[in-house]
Image (cartoon, rainbow, N blue to C red):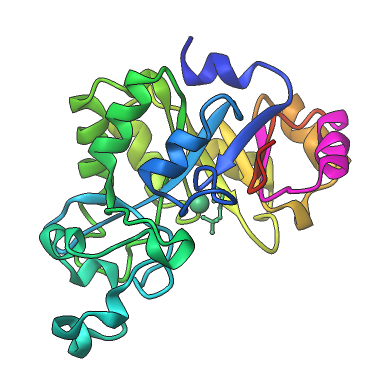
Amino acid sequence: MNFLELLKKPDLIAAHRGDRSQKPENTLSALASSIGKCDFIEIDVQLTKDLVPVIIHDETLNRTSNVSNIQRFKDRTPWIVSDFTLKELQSLDFGSWFNSEYESILTLEKALSFVKENHLFLNVEIKDMSKTFSDEIVVEIIIDMIKKTQTEHLVLLSSFYHHYLPMCKKLSSKIPTAALQLYKHPDNLINYLHTLQVNAYHPEDKIINKKTVSDLREAGFFVNVFTVNKTKRQKKLFEWDVNGVFTDSLV
Ligand code: G3P
Ligand code: MG
């Protein structure tokens, strides 16, 4: 089965940043902990200063690492991820802020290998790097890594920065893509999604309604909604024919 075939199954549950209610988000232990509790896992990817794709949500390191306690990084505030090399990131602890267990930074390469070994599916969300020097190259580096690990069939690529999405399709027509959206739907939503050449639309829960889901499904797009932690709301969305929901609370 590939990711597109997975999307045809009903009522999909996606582990938002891994099993983040039990383990530090976007780490290997969060991926491992979500096995058997979801249909696919979502992670966030951005590039280090030396252009290595790593798994971390925020633009800065402070919330999910011990960077603020490290003397030699004191003058590097606000600790922007893309200002740090992989080696520097590997000297930090990404677990103890959450549960006192050491956890190293997860690379995309490691995440993809893990997914392949464990027969899982992965939504790789490409963070907006338009304010950084690696903007031009981020999509190419991520897709090269997916090809290198031979995981094209296991991955779906998404981004809030829609400019990346046609680039993804151009570099690999095999990998499904999704447009993420907050606050308000783009004008002429269906046409707009066609121009992006995406397979799916990932809106935040607040902006979705039954009619929009029905229009999107009718037009052939998959719809996965974030972040939906209440079972009752998940059920309602599935009744509307939403394909999947991202959740922080796996059961
Ligand atoms: O991909 C769904 C969700 O992860 C998007 O929001 O900010 O948690 O990456 P965020
Ligand atoms: Mg995300």
Q: What is the quadrant of residue 171 in the picture?
A: top left
Does 82 sit above or below residue 231?
A: below
Q: Magenta region: which residues?
A: 222-240
Image coordinates for residue 37, horizontal then vertical, percent: 61, 29
Image coordinates for residue 240, horizontal then vertical, percent: 86, 32
- Left or right placement of residue 215 versus residue 187 in this view: right
Q: Report the residue at 31% width, 71% height from top.
A: 131
Q: Residue furthest bottom?
A: 75
Image coordinates for residue 113, horizontal then vertical, percent: 27, 28
Q: Report the residue at 66% width, 45% height from top.
A: 247
Does 19 sit above or below residue 74?
A: above
Nearer the observer, 7 or 171: 7
Image coordinates for residue 57, horizontal then vertical, percent: 43, 59
Is 32 one of the magenta-colored residues?
no
Q: Report the residue at 22% width, 42% height from top.
A: 140
- The answer to whether residue 124 shows anywhere in this view is no
- The answer to whether residue 140 shows anywhere in this view is yes
Q: Residue furthest top?
A: 1
Is 238 one of the magenta-colored residues?
yes
Q: Report the residue at 48% width, 9% height from top.
A: 1
The C terminus lies in quadrant: top right
- Left or right placement of residue 111 versus residue 24 in this view: left
Q: What is the quadrant of residue 112 in the picture?
A: top left
Circle count: 0
Nearer the observer, 183 or 26: 26
Nearer the observer, 65 or 222: 65
